[in-house]
Image: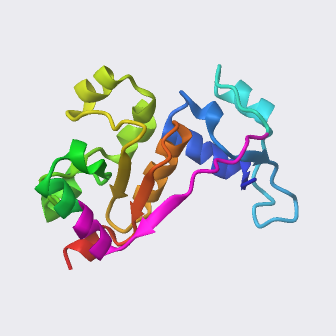
């Protein structure tokens, strides 16, 4: 079980948006007086419920058992070549860049076959819990199917890992994180 302080959990709740947060695989813990945050107020799960309205937070969750594979530039290059030489459907891969539009405008896309879905939209809109139609209307590409392998990329591999975790929480199991990100790709 992953343990987080109430302060970390609140930050994640606000980053994700309250909708769907109850499935987050973390345990709420109180900050102890001996910790470095001794002067910070602590909140229990019931305090969160009162402060955040109708959102319900449980004190513990089962840990997500989905393994997220990590790959390097060479492996991603091979996947992109596979998609470009066949198609997304035939290859079984979908590559999603979770950087913001301005970051992509600055460096360019990794490839034309790479889809763009910024992490804040994944979190705020609950992208992977949307219907296929709503997903495509909102983001301009087909929602990944449960049996497709989703490769996430960002600037340095951190936001892409968060995106993979959101996908895992919504039932996806074939998940890959490109650890190098755009900083590695465009080097």
- State the image quarter where residue 123 is shown: top left
Residue 38 horizontal side relative to residue 104, left or right: right
Identity of the residue drawn at 69% across and 26% down: 56
Residue range in magenta is 60-79
Q: 20 or 170: which is nearer to us?
A: 170
Residue 36 horizontal side relative to residue 162, left or right: right
Count of numbered badges drawn on the protein? 0
Residue 135 lies, in percent from the top left, at 31, 28
Residue 186 lies, in percent from the top left, at 19, 74
Residue 14 horizontal side relative to residue 5, left or right: left
Q: Quadrant of the C terminus?
A: bottom left
Q: 95 or 14: which is nearer to us?
A: 95
Identity of the residue drawn at 64% across and 31% down: 22
In the picture as drawn, the residue positioned furthest to the right comes out as 33
Can residue 77 be found in the magenta stretch? yes
Look at the picture and state if 89 lies above or below 77.
Answer: above
Look at the picture and state if 51 lies above or below 183.
Answer: above
Look at the picture and state if 99 lies above or below 135.
Answer: below
């Amino acid at each position: 079980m992953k343990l987080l302080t109430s302060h970390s959990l609140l930050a994640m709740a606000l980053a994700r948006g309250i909708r769907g947060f109850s499935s987050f695989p973390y345990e709420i813990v109180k900050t102890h007086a001996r910790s470095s945050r001794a002067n910070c107020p602590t909140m229990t799960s019931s305090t969160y419920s009162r402060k955040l309205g109708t959102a319900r937070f449980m004190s513990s969750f089962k840990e997500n058992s989905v393994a997220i594979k990590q790959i390097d530039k060479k492996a991603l290059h091979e996947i992109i070549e596979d998609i470009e030489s066949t198609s997304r459907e035939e290859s079984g891969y979908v590559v999603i860049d979770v950087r913001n539009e301005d970051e992509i405008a600055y460096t360019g896309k990794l490839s034309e076959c790479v889809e763009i879905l910024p992490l804040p939209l994944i979190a705020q809109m609950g992208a992977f819990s949307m219907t296929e139609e709503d997903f495509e209307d909102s983001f301009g590409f087909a929602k990944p199917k449960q049996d497709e392998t989703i490769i996430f990329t960002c600037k340095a591999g951190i936001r892409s890992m968060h995106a993979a975790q959101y996908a895992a929480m919504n039932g996806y199991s074939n998940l890959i994180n490109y650890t190098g990100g755009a900083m590695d790709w465009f080097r």
